């Protein structure tokens, strides 16, 4: 039940799909998926442990923190203009920096998102927090794998300069959307 509830909530009401695809354009898919999974495992654990508190955390401040995370990611992607050789090295060897960038983009963005709220609500209704965490993580990992697959298909068809523009631009758009949501929250 947790798997389906979180998967549906994430597919309908979450913007990290776009961040995943954007970061997948730039970094090795395994690094992006690992960072996404670890960041969301921690966030989902917090959501499950806090339960009812997480249901009330949805405020304009969470949107502003998300906006900052997206804008910092956009700047880091834009400023770091690697050559084709450096991209190959980044995808093969310099993964710690990529892992940190991706982890930060996912960890600091979208606290109190629909998936976390769904998991927190399920915890309130059941006495099985570990099963809910596991189901939620399976759903998030599936969502991440699907978004990365799309990102990889795009990466194989576009030049590096276009990829950098798309990845950085996508993060900026997500940051602007988060600011807009903070104004309406």
Image: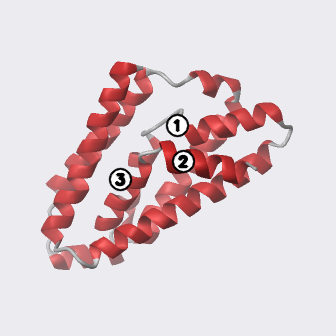
Q: In the rendered structure, which disc, 3 or 2, sits on the residue that comes first in sequence? A: 2
Q: Residue furthest right?
A: 127
In this rendering, does residue 76 appear at all? no
Pointer 1: what residue?
Answer: 113
Pointer 2: what residue?
Answer: 10
Q: Position of residue 107 (x, y in %)?
A: 47, 44
Identified at 42% across, 20% down, the residue is: 185
Residue 157 in the figure: left or right of residue 143: left
Question: Where 153 sits versus 124, above or below?
Answer: below
Binning the other alpha carbons within 10 Å of mark 1 as few (below 14), some (14 to 19) or many (20 upward) gives: many
Identified at 26% across, 51% down, the residue is: 170
SS type, badge 2:
helix
SS type, badge 1:
loop
Q: In the rendered structure, which disc, 1 or 2, sits on the residue that comes first in sequence? A: 2
Q: Are marks 3 and 1 in contact (CB under 8 Å)?
A: no
Q: Are marks 1 and 2 in contact (CB under 8 Å)?
A: yes
């Amino acid at each position: 039940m947790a798997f389906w509830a979180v998967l549906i909530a994430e597919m309908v009401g979450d913007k990290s799909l776009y961040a995943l695809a954007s970061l997948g354009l730039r970094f090795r898919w395994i690094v992006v998926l690992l960072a996404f999974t670890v960041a969301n495992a921690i966030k989902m654990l917090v959501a499950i442990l806090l339960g009812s508190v997480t249901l009330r955390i949805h405020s304009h401040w969470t949107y502003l923190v998300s906006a900052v995370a997206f804008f910092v990611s956009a700047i880091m992607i834009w400023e770091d203009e690697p050559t084709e050789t450096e991209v190959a090295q980044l995808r093969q060897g310099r993964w710690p920096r990529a892992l940190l960038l991706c982890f930060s983009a996912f960890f600091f963005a979208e606290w109190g998102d629909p998936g976390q709220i769904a998991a927190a609500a399920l915890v309130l209704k059941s006495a099985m927090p570990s099963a809910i965490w596991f189901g939620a993580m399976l759903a998030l990992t599936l969502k991440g794998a699907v978004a990365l697959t799309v990102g990889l298909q795009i990466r194989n068809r576009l030049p590096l300069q276009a990829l950098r523009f798309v990845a950085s631009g996508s993060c900026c758009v997500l940051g602007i959307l988060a600011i807009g949501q903070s104004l309406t929250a």
